[in-house]
Image (cartoon, rainbow, N blue to C red):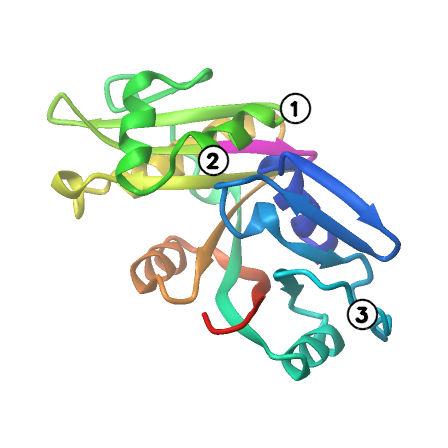
Amino acid sequence: MNSDALYAAIDVTWPSETVTPDGPWVHRKAVGAGSRLNATTLKLTSGSVPDDIPDRPLFMVRGDQSALNTALENRGYAVKDPVTAYVINVEKIAQASGPTRVFTGWPELAVMAEVWATGGIGPERIASMERVKTTKAGFLCRANDRAAGVAFAAIDRELAMLHALEVLAHARRTNVATDILKHAAYWAAENGARHLAVLVTTANAGANALYQNLGFEKGVGYHYRIRGAV
């Protein structure tokens, strides 16, 4: 899975409200929807950086954009939230779960929105899911006849990307996240995808360990540069 495909899928499967090209730059805006949907990116993935870096509060810097990273550092932009994309061939973990364990469907159920809200995933982020134009699905996992965890996934060509994985406190350490990932891989395969990807911050040690233990491999990385102190 090449880096261009991964970066493209990030935008396709979790789109911003507005995307404004500006020469070599792309500005995004979706109020209240998090850093990725409000960041400015440089179209070029390597090489020199234009002299006229726009005066923007937040940039997303891809792993191969060292020149841009240095230029922003020199302008006083601080690093925020390094992220790794993990990828796996769906055949390695795909496993269907019965509907009493993992429900798959879209639009999202009200209970799914309630679970997302516990993790700070509110209406603005759910609006991003609704904007996705490709094949997509929400996943609701149940444990002991109670909602236990949720996630969202969408497909860009042969890559399915899973977002917004949230497990309720009462269901942690009960394989809820693992069951969702395996079922999402099964759903992805059934819909023509060959790979499943997830995004996780470096600071989330538990999630990094989970993906590595399941056999996910590190793909691309990125971080943000934010004006002023983090």
- Residue 23 vs residue 164, the one in the foreground: 23
- Distance CA(mark 2)–CA(mark 1): 15 Å
Tell me which label, 2 or 3, sits earlier in the chain.
3
- Residue 114: x and y, percent? 28, 27
Q: Name which quarter of the figure residue 71 lies in.
A: bottom right
Residue topped by disc 1? 133
The residue at 41%/40% (across/down) is: 164
Q: What secondary structure do most residues of the magenta stretch adopt?
A: strand
Q: Name which quarter of the figure residue 203 lies in.
A: bottom left
Q: Amino acid at mark 2?
A: Arg
Q: Amino acid at mark 3?
A: Ser
The residue tagged with tag 1: helix, strand or loop?
Answer: loop
- Count of number-bearing discs: 3
Neighbor class of circle 3 (other Cα within 10 Å; few <14, some 14-19, many 20+) is: some
- Distance CA(mark 2)–CA(mark 3): 30 Å
- Residue 67 vs residue 178, the one in the foreground: 67
Q: Specify whether 10 is left or right of 117.
A: right
- Residue 206 vs residue 189, the one in the foreground: 206
Q: Amino acid at mark 1?
A: Lys
The quarter of the image holding the C terminus is: bottom left
Image: 211 above or below 189? below
Residue topped by disc 3? 46
Q: Is residue 42 magenta?
A: no
Tell me which label, 2 or 1, sits earlier in the chain.
2
Neighbor class of circle 1 (other Cα within 10 Å; few <14, some 14-19, many 20+) is: few
The residue at 65%/25% (across/down) is: 134
Residue at the extreme bottom: 74
Tag on residue 125?
2
Q: Which region shows up in magenta?
A: 153-158
- Residue 110: x and y, percent? 32, 17
- Residue 228: x and y, percent? 53, 72
Q: Specify whether 77 is left or right of 94.
A: right
